[in-house]
Amino acid sequence: MFCNKCGQHMPDNAVFCSGCGTNQQGDITISQHKPIYEMKTITCYPTERAEQQTNEFYQDLGWEVLSMDRKQLNAGQTPNFFFDGSNVAYGGSTQHFTTQTHISIRRDKKMPNYDKIKELSDKAEYYRSEQKNPRPEYFGKESEIAKAKLAGCIWLIELFPVGLYFLIAGNRAEKKLKQDTIVYKQNIVKNYAIADEYRQQCKKLL
């Protein structure tokens, strides 16, 4: 037989798993098949709320969370969002983040209803992905826009054409960011609602 928690092979009369130490006579059900796991790593913002929401989402899709680790971002890199505990996904700044959380998860391919669960979970993930919800063009560049406008004001005095160029460019970028953010927020709300529908359907099959 095999431990249903870690998949370690054990004698049929074993009480404790030699791999993870789980009591096989407790609440853990002994499985007569060896699990075949699919594994992957996902990322989210390094906040407790974001980490909790991400874990709960994937558990509802049949995944088991193995570990979490906050890792340093490279210079100029912004964290990938999946769930956001600080409203960043809804148009806030990402500039104060220097890390992102990496979460390792696995799911047994031999679990009941696996094919249907995978189909639903893939759709739920897609509607919460950055592929489906691309960020606005100037997302996270608020400070750069402000610097361009400030430079324009300064150059208006010393070199008018250059100052006017920077000022107009900064104002256009600021206006576009505001307009794009409104559309972005609307898409987030709509697509996240669709993702939650697939999530609930998936949860019922577990």
Image (cartoon, rainbow, N blue to C red):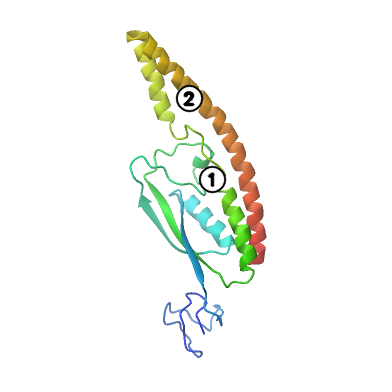
Residue type at numbered disc 2: Ala
- Image location (x, y in percent) of residue 68: 42, 59
Asked if residue 111 is positioned above or below residue 193 in the image, the reply reads below
Residue most extreme to the bottom: 13
Residue type at numbered disc 1: Gln
x 57%, y 44%: residue:
132
Asked if residue 176 is positioned above or below residue 116 in the image, the reply reads above
Q: Which numbered marker is on residue 112? A: none
Q: Where's the C terminus, which quadrant?
A: bottom right
Is 54 on the left or on the right of 206, as rendered? left
Q: Could you say which quadrant of the image residue 198 lies in?
A: bottom right
Label 2: few (<14), some (14–19) or many (≥20) C-alpha neighbours in 10 Å: many
Q: Residue 81 versus residue 166: which sits nearer the camera?
A: 166
Q: Residue 109 versus residue 105: which sits nearer the camera?
A: 109
Asked if residue 128 is positioned above or below residue 168 in the image, the reply reads below
Label 1: few (<14), some (14–19) or many (≥20) C-alpha neighbours in 10 Å: few
x 56%, y 28%: residue:
179
Q: Of label 1 and label 2, which has the lower sequence position?
A: 1
Label 1 or label 2, whichever lies nearer to me, is: 1
Number of disc labels = 2
- Image location (x, y in percent) of residue 75: 33, 41
Question: Regarding mark 1 in the picture, which secondary structure is present there?
Answer: loop
- Image location (x, y in percent) of residue 20: 43, 77
The residue wearing badge 2 is 173
Question: Regarding mark 2 in the picture, which secondary structure is present there?
Answer: helix
x 45%, y 48%: residue:
45
Whole-number angstrom distance, CA of label 1 to CA of label 2 = 23 Å
Q: Which numbered marker is on residue 131? A: 1
Asked if residue 139 is positioned above or below residue 55 in the image, the reply reads above
Contact, CB < 8 Å: mark 1 with mark 2?
A: no
